[in-house]
Image (cartoon, rainbow, N blue to C red):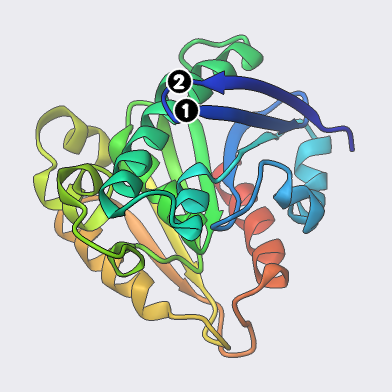
């Protein structure tokens, strides 16, 4: 399966960025890599291949980007305030650079996206849905980690609150909350080694308290926190959401 990559310099995140694409037709799906991954990580770990039937049938086009916010955090780039600012900038880059690029590629200026990711990628997917419900219609959050404050070494202030699901949910109001009532989030998790399904149940409670449709799917104790689980999950949920 051919990979199409586009690269440019983003002034929002102050570095070169990559957008990768697989497929030619179908619902656009933005899949985030894991914490330190690049745009082509999901292909190297065969997540794209696991979705080959859906891609070949023209039901989905899969896109991915570099995990800029995760890389900044893992590398300890600057202090906690700088890292939080970069996290906020990352979502500005997604909305103002990646989404227009995807829509141009789809030849549809109003097409809605599905988003997905594993681990910290699930945090990115959920935050996209909450921040931009006018663009994203569903999020597939696999083995998610949704509270990143423990990864910062100091105070993060308002910048992180602007991109933290736990901070965003209580502040939602008006048109964004109305839109989210028509959106959907699936929270899927194994219960094996290094999985914490409690994260999914906790965020599901917060989503439900604001009237945002969601579902927790436990995959059981025989699934550890690793790529084989996500290769099983993603095509199943994409099939469900694109029928």
Image quadrant in which the N terminus is located:
top right
Q: Which mark is residue 11?
A: 2
Between the residue at mark 1 and the residue at mark 2, the CA separation in whole angstroms equals 5 Å
Can I make out residue 182 in this image? no
Work out whether residue 81 or residue 103 is closer to the camera in this orientation and state it.
Answer: 81
Q: Which mark is residue 153?
A: none
Tally of numbered tags: 2
Work out whether residue 216 or residue 203 is closer to the camera in this orientation and state it.
Answer: 203
Q: Secondary structure at mark 1?
A: loop
Tell me where residue 138 appears, x and y as whole percent.
44, 43
Question: To which residue does mark 1 refer?
Answer: 14
Labelled pair 1, 2 in contact (Cβ < 8 Å):
yes
Q: Is residue 24 left or right of residue 11?
A: right
Q: Within 10 angstroms of label 2, few (less than 14), some, or many (20 or more) residues?
A: few
Tell me where residue 219 appears, x and y as whole percent.
56, 78
Q: Quadrant of residue 196?
A: bottom left
Tell me where residue 53 appears, x and y as whole percent.
82, 46
The residue located at (31%, 70%) in the rendering is: 150
Q: Secondary structure at mark 2?
A: loop
- Examine the rendered structure and indicate whether residue 27 appears above or below residue 215: above
- Examine the rendered structure and indicate whether residue 119 appears above or below residue 70: below
Q: Is residue 50 left or right of residue 142?
A: right
Image quadrant in which the C terminus is located:
top right
The residue located at (10%, 31%) in the rendering is: 174
Question: In the image as oriented, which residue stretches furthest toward the right?
Answer: 1
Q: Is residue 63 left or right of residue 53?
A: left
Work out whether residue 241 or residue 192 is closer to the camera in this orientation and state it.
Answer: 192
- Examine the rendered structure and indicate whether residue 227 appears above or below residue 106: below
Q: Within 10 angstroms of label 1, few (less than 14), some, or many (20 or more) residues?
A: few
Tell me where residue 217 appears, x and y as whole percent.
47, 71
């Amino acid at each position: 399966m051919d990979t199409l990559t586009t690269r440019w310099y983003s002034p929002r995140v102050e570095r070169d960025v990559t957008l990768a694409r697989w497929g030619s037709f179908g619902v656009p799906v933005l899949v985030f890599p894991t914490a330190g991954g690049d745009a082509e990580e999901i292909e190297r770990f065969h997540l794209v291949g696991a979705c080959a039937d859906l891609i070949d049938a023209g039901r989905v086009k899969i896109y991915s980007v570099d995990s800029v916010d995760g890389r900044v955090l893992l590398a300890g780039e600057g202090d906690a305030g700088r890292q939080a600012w970069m996290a906020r900038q990352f979502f500005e880059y997604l909305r103002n650079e990646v989404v227009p690029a995807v829509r141009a590629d789809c030849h549809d200026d109003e097409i809605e996206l599905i988003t997905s990711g594993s681990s910290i990628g699930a945090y990115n997917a959920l935050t996209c849905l909450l921040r931009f419900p006018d663009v994203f219609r569903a999020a597939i959050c696999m083995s998610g980690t949704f509270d990143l404050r423990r990864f910062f070494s100091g105070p993060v202030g308002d910048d992180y609150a602007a991109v933290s699901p736990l901070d965003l949910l209580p502040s939602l109001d008006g048109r964004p909350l109305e839109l989210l009532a028509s959106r959907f989030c699936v929270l899927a998790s194994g219960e094996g080694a290094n999985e914490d399904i409690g994260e999914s149940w906790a965020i599901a409670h917060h989503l439900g308290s604001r009237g945002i449709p969601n579902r927790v799917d436990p995959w059981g104790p025989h699934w550890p926190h690793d790529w084989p689980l996500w290769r099983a999950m993603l095509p199943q949920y994409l099939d469900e959401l694109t029928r």
